[in-house]
Amino acid sequence: MAQKRLAFVGGGNMASSIIGGLVNAGYPSNHITVFEPNADLARSLQTQFGTLNASSNDQAVLGHPSGGPADVVLFCVKPQVMQVVAKGVAGAVQKVKPLVVSIAAGIRSVDLERWLGGTLAIVRVMPNTPALLLEGASGLVANGAVTPEQKEFSVTLLKTVSKSVEWVDSEHMIDVTTGLSGSGPAYFFLLLEVMEDAAVKLGMPRETARALAAQTCIGAGRMALEEGKKGVDCAELRRRVTSPGGTTAAGLTVLEDGGFRTMVESCVNAATHRGTEMGELFGKDT
Ligand SMILES: O=C(O)[C@@H]1CCC=N1
């Protein structure tokens, strides 16, 4: 991977997953500078990964004393604070003109670009928390200023923590990605929680239930991916498990009759819609 200098604005969960993924993939930690206001978090990143701690966002972008100016600035802050943070570091960013990568849900590239003080190459990314285990799924979209080389670098960077990295063709599709895979782990956790509880009520020890249910989720996901490459869709995979008059059919009838499809569709719609709404809400200049 090209060894660009990376500045992380924010060193929370997602930033530390990405940093961990990069360093484990052999990325030089002295090319990674982080500004994280929480001193404990910042120290723990430095101890764990050997990254450089900056004393401000400006310093992360302009260059840590033992580094140089950033080629890529990754905004890993909550959407609520993006405006204040971006405006605060705009001067430094305009001096350096790096590739800007943002993982904030909802925040539009045009708003970020305006807060950062003018035209910039911006890639919006929606990763998800399984990136912590290098099992993430990430969607990304680039604005018109992003070069093919910067696009390639963005994919390489995300691949260190994501098994699926998918370009989407509009910012609306990043909101859809948020509703699907950004928030998606929580949907599966809820499903697993309920499946596990049901088995426990039927007398199974919790650890056994957890192990069986979670591996079923992983196995089904892998089958969906691998069979999908051969053109087999999820409906067909479901039919292959479902013997006529058998146990699966009995279970699925309850889900179908209970409105499972409508409910899950409404869930993805609501999360997507909230992403768009957050973009409108937090995108207004204050
Ligand atoms: O819930 C949220 O707003 C964020 C975005 C995707 C996952 N978590």
Image (spheres, grey):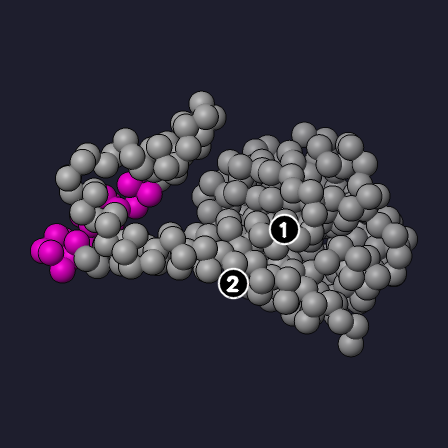
The circle drawn on residue 270 is 2
Q: Which residues are magenta?
A: 199-217
| Residue at the limit of the structure toward the top, as seen here | 230
The answer to whether 284 is drawn above or below residue 234 in the figure is: below
Kindly report the distance in space between the C-alpha atoms of the residues bearing marks 1 and 2: 14 Å
Q: Name the residue tied to disc 1.
A: 174
Whether residue 22 is in magenta: the answer is no
Give, as a three-letter code, the residue at label 1. Ile
Q: Are marks 1 and 2 in contact (CB under 8 Å)?
A: no
Query: Callout 2: 10 Å neighbours few (<14), some, many (20+)?
Result: some
- Tell me the residue at 21%/59% (across/down): 197
Q: Earlier in the sequence, mark 1 or mark 2?
A: 1
| Residue at the limit of the structure toward the bottom, as seen here | 286
- Tell me the residue at 52%/58% (across/down): 269
- Tell me the residue at 44%/29% (across/down): 228
| Residue at the limit of the structure toward the left, as seen here | 203
Element marked by disc 2: helix
- Asked if residue 93 shows in the view, the reply is yes
The picture places residue 113, in percent across and down from the top left corner, at 82, 57
Give, as a three-letter code, the residue at label 2. Ala
Closer to us: 16 or 218: 218
The picture places residue 94, in percent across and down from the top left corner, at 88, 55
The picture places residue 151, in percent across and down from the top left corner, at 73, 36
Closer to us: 233 or 53: 233
Q: Main secondary structure of the magenta part?
A: helix
